[in-house]
Image: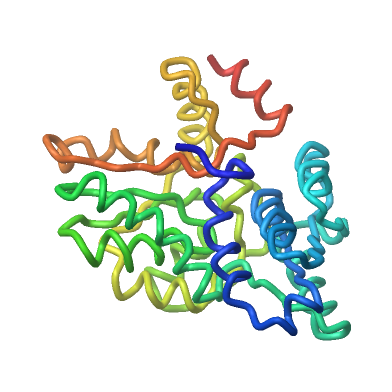
Amino acid sequence: DTLPTGSFKIRGVTTLLANLDEEFREGGVVTASSGNYGRALAQAARWFDTEAIVAVPEGTGQNRIEGIEHLGGRIKVIGDDYDDSAEWAADIAAEEGYRYVHPGNERLVIAGTGTAGLEIAESLPDVDLVLGPIGAGTIGAGYSLSVGAVTDADVIGVQAASVDATYQAWRTGEFTPQAEAHTFADGIAARVPYSLPVEVMRERLDAFYTVDEDEIIETVAEMFSKERILMEGACAPPFAILEELRDEIAGKTIAIPVTGRNLPGAKVEQVLSNQ
């Protein structure tokens, strides 16, 4: 099955908007995004008849901007990266009364993300391992609280090694932002770790790994060439770690959702040239 907007993020923001008080819906919502979260919020805002403002960093692909605008979202291009945009979005929410939809510290977004885990549990009740990509950590937290809680499956998170602030926070308990966030997997390029998903993952996530840039790009290329599945770099880390885990996972039932298909044109060309 595929989701509206081509990304798992529609699950979380729709759950949040469905449970917002009417006063917040009337005032509108604002968030920051490198693409998919913004598209999801714009779509959910349309369903619930409210305004959505999406701050995106400089360099965001035009196709992603147009995708948000096509769904009715209002774009503000601000900052060098996702976290600069998030700071602006939080400020405008405080100044003008919008409901700021945080990219990580939202219980309802984590709960909505976890609905994918419940679907895995329903369709594969004997699943042994569920792997998901980690940026801010809503997938790691959401899957841990859903399929990880109702089955015997271990839940494993995988992050890009070049932007691993969340992994480091999970490992050490210290929340230290990175200075920069550059990765092919821009959908999980969160250089600031967030307390709520990290807290859940430190308690419930069974394992956490990182993979390097070459592995991410090679995985996207291989999935397209062998399976004709076009997925984003942000989806690739769980697939890229399988070779490293070969001995551990042999003979086990594994589930890895493809969490996004909105690969920018320039990256499609990069992937094709890598075949």
Residue extending furthest left?
251
Q: Residue at x 80, y 61 (%)?
A: 55
Q: At 18% across and 40% down in the image, what residue appears?
A: 253
Q: Report the colour scheme.
A: rainbow
Q: Position of residue 138 (x, y in %)?
A: 48, 63
Residue placed most toward the observer, 11 or 110: 11
Q: Quadrant of residue 271?
A: top right
In this figure, what is the number of numbered marks? 0
Residue 201 lies left or right of residue 151; in this view the side is right
Looking at this view, is 104 or 121 the one in front? 121
| 230 over 174 or under it: above or below | above
Q: Quadrant of the N terminus?
A: top left
Is 219 situated left or right of 79 in this image?
Answer: left
Q: Position of residue 274 (x, y in %)?
A: 57, 18
Q: Nearer the viewer, residue 151 or 144?
A: 151
Classify residue 116 as left or right of residue 184. left
In the image, residue 202 lies at what x, y percent? 34, 73
**Residue at figure coordinates x 60%, y 60% from the top left:** 190
147 shown above or below 233: below
Q: For this view, does 251 lie left or right of residue 264?
A: left
253 lies above or below 154: above
